[in-house]
Amino acid sequence: MCIPGWVVALTVDFKATKVCSGNATTLVSLSTPRDSIRYLLWDLNGDGKFGDAAGDTVLFTFTVSGYHNVGLKVLTYSGVSKAIYHLIGVGELTVDYTFNTGCSTQPSYFNDRTIVLGDTVSSYTWNFGDVTPQSHDRNTTHIYTASGQFLVKFKVVTTAGCADSISKTIFIGNPPAVNLVFSGDTLLAKGDSVIVSVQGTTDSLLWSTGQKSSAIILKTAGNYWLRAFLGGCYIQKSFRIRTTNYGADPVIETLFTPNGDGFNDYWEILNLSKVGPCDVTVYSRSGEKVLSRTGYANDWDGSFNGIILANDTYYYFVRCLDQVLHQGTVNILK
């Protein structure tokens, strides 16, 4: 025992076991030197009063999970006192997760929504309900190779050993079976257009052009795609339209759709800026002149006397800067 009135470097500290809600926490003093200590007093509710327990080791069950401010006060035989506080965690967790509507052969997304109190997570385990390996990521993706219902179990374990899990049944659908049909060649030449249409059952469609119709008309080269949706699933199909060199001749559209949707609403000479100005005349099948323009500006909307003409084939005559007469047919498709 130390001589009264003299204390050698009093150090106050303690440790606590990690526990889950409902279990007793063991609090152990690490204070030194032990032979100088007369009293060890505990503040277990964080109120600043050291009257809740006494002794080197204390067992205490916190009624609420989370972090608790616990203090230890040490008094020596010489009358010196010191105190220290630590946050002591009592673990509790409620496991949950969210997921998107999934489709076979496409990623399904799973996101952790677990609530953890008084502890930290040590492991995550996903069981996807098929024969594939488990995942131990917090948030994960998974690709199912077939459609159907799957029981997905998500388990979380904390550093204190608290564990909880949840299982949910999810439905994985099949992407729609669709085909693209091309009316015309995907190698465009001299104002040709190609109609791309969809065959198959779908809920909705979205083209890379922004259109949502079952068929679109393309007149320029490029890479395009279609997304077809059915029952929350979708499939994407990509295709390419190429074009030949325009050369010195006018490149005149053979098809346009004056329906006011903002796409292909006007009949155009595609390289007008290079070969113009151009004079144009258009006749109906019956020989009636429905358009006559000098210095055409790619602005005919298919109307005659203020009314949009019927879907049909019309005959054009175009003479541009080189004074060569070009003639052919143009189709209106609303």
Image (cartoon, grey):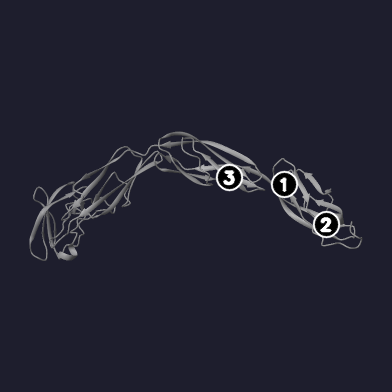
Secondary structure at badge 1 equals loop
Q: x%, y% of residue 57?
A: 80, 47
Q: Is residue 176 visible?
A: yes
- Quadrant in the picture for residue 269: bottom left
Q: Amino acid at mark 3?
A: Ser
- Quadrant in the picture for residue 162: top right
Q: Amino acid at mark 1?
A: Thr
How busy is the neighbourhood of tag 1: few (under 14 within 10 Å), some, or many (20 plus)? some
The CA distance from mark 2 to mark 1 is 22 Å
Secondary structure at badge 2 equals loop
Q: Earlier in the sequence, mark 2 or mark 1?
A: 1
Camera-nearest residue between 148 and 136: 136
Q: x%, y% of residue 227?
A: 34, 46
Query: Could you tell whether 243 is left or right of 2 in the image?
Result: left
Q: Locate the N terminus and report the quarter of the image it occupies.
A: bottom right
Q: Which residue is mark 2?
A: 33
The CA distance from mark 1 to mark 3 is 19 Å
Q: Which mark is residue 17?
A: 1
Q: Earlier in the sequence, mark 2 or mark 3?
A: 2
Q: Earlier in the sequence, mark 1 or mark 3?
A: 1
- Asked if marks 2 and 3 touch (Cβ < 8 Å), the reply is no
| Residue, far top | 149
Q: x%, y% of residue 183?
A: 20, 45
Q: Nearer the viewer, mark 2 or mark 1?
A: 2
The structure residue drawn at horizontal position 63% and vertical position 48%, both measured from the top left corner, is 120
Camera-nearest residue between 315 and 249: 249
Q: Which residue is mark 3?
A: 123
The CA distance from mark 2 to mark 3 is 39 Å
- Asked if marks 1 and 3 touch (Cβ < 8 Å), the reply is no
Secondary structure at badge 3 equals strand
Camera-nearest residue between 205 and 23: 23
